[in-house]
């Protein structure tokens, strides 16, 4: 699952996990970047430091390195065991975020084919939301500077939230990120469903489930 910051990925993934558990369906979880011991170290570099001097190619390759480890340690074993794998972000995020930073999304796909061994999600759900609304939900503002791991005085509406290097970029950057997410169905090598992220969590979840059912049928 993917989308702009504040679109509600965490909430929707939690609802999906509850539904799978209630149905007795076994599943694995992936977090991108991170989700493995090595990947979490790479995530720390990507999100907890000022990346203004980092070349966007370096940035994209670091995401791919974390992703390659996630595939080996989490995704491939889950698929081999016949389990469902839910992932919080994937290659789609690199297409949008590093694409907005100036890296050609088509090149992202080329790099990803090697990093993920050409194993793509059966379905990528992109929660669509204007970035301004996303930042309203999280109580943050695009371009806001961090002080340590958190911005002093900001309101936390969701768990595990802090102003990271991606969120600290200007609003125009996040608007371009949204545009690139909406363009994914035109070239992504696997199915993409754009789901309206506005409304209550339950309303959005109904749309998510419909997208899953439509993809299966």
Image (cartoon, grey):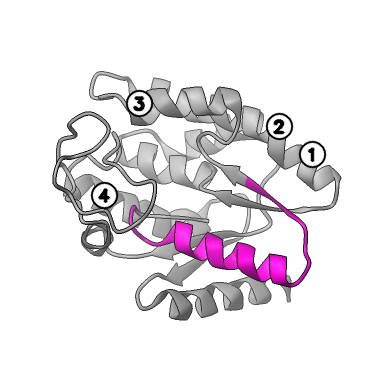
Tag 1: Cα neighbours inside 10 Å, few (<14), some, or many (≥20)?
A: some
Q: Earlier in the sequence, mark 4 or mark 1?
A: 1
Q: Tell me, for residue 56, which label it has, or none.
A: 3
Q: Are marks 2 and 1 in contact (CB under 8 Å)?
A: yes
Q: Which mark is residue 182?
A: none
| Residue 77: image tag | 1
What residue lies at 79% left-to-right and 39% top-to-bottom? 77
Q: Based on the displayed image, in which of its 4 quarters is residue 67 positioned? A: top right
Residue 7 covered by magenta stretch: yes
From the viewer's side, name the closer residue of 173 and 48. 48
Q: Are marks 1 and 3 in contact (CB under 8 Å)?
A: no
- Residue 106 versus residue 201 in the image, above or below: above
Query: How far across and how far down the image is residue 94, in percent?
Result: 45, 40
Q: Using the image as rendered, state which of residue 91 and residue 7 is in the foreground.
A: 7
| Side (left or right) of 141 relative to 59 | left
Q: Which residue is mark 4?
A: 174
Relative vertical location of residue 175 with respect to residue 19 in this rendering, above or below: above
Is tag 1's residue or tag 3's residue first in the polypeptide sequence?
3
For marks 3 and 2, give the CA distance: 26 Å
**Distance CA(mark 1)–CA(mark 3):** 31 Å
Q: Is residue 44 at least partly visible in the picture?
A: yes
Instruction: Measure the C-alpha gap from mark 2 to mark 1.
Output: 7 Å
């Amino acid at each position: 699952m993917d989308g702009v910051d504040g679109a509600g990925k965490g909430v929707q993934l939690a609802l999906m996990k509850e539904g799978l558990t209630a149905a007795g369906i076994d599943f694995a979880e992936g977090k991108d970047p991170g989700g493995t011991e090595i990947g979490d170290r790479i995530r720390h570099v990507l999100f907890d430091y000022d990346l203004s001097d980092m070349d966007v190619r370096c940035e994209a390759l670091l995401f791919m390195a974390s992703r390659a480890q996630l595939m080996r340690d989490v995704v491939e074993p889950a698929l081999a065991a016949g389990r469902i794998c839910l992932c919080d972000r994937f290659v789609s995020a690199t297409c949008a975020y590093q694409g907005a930073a100036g890296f050609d999304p088509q090149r992202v796909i080329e790099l990803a084919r090697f990093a993920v061994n050409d194993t793509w999600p059966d379905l990528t759900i992109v929660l669509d939301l204007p970035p301004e609304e996303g930042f309203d939900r999280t109580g943050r503002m695009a371009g806001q500077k961090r002080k340590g791991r958190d911005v002093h005085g900001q309101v936390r509406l969701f768990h595990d939230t802090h102003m990271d290097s991606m969120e600290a970029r200007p609003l125009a950057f996040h608007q371009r990120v949204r545009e690139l997410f909406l363009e994914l169905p035109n070239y992504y090598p696997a199915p993409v469903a754009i789901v309206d992220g506005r409304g209550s969590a339950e309303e959005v979840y109904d749309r998510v489930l419909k997208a899953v059912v439509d993809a299966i049928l």
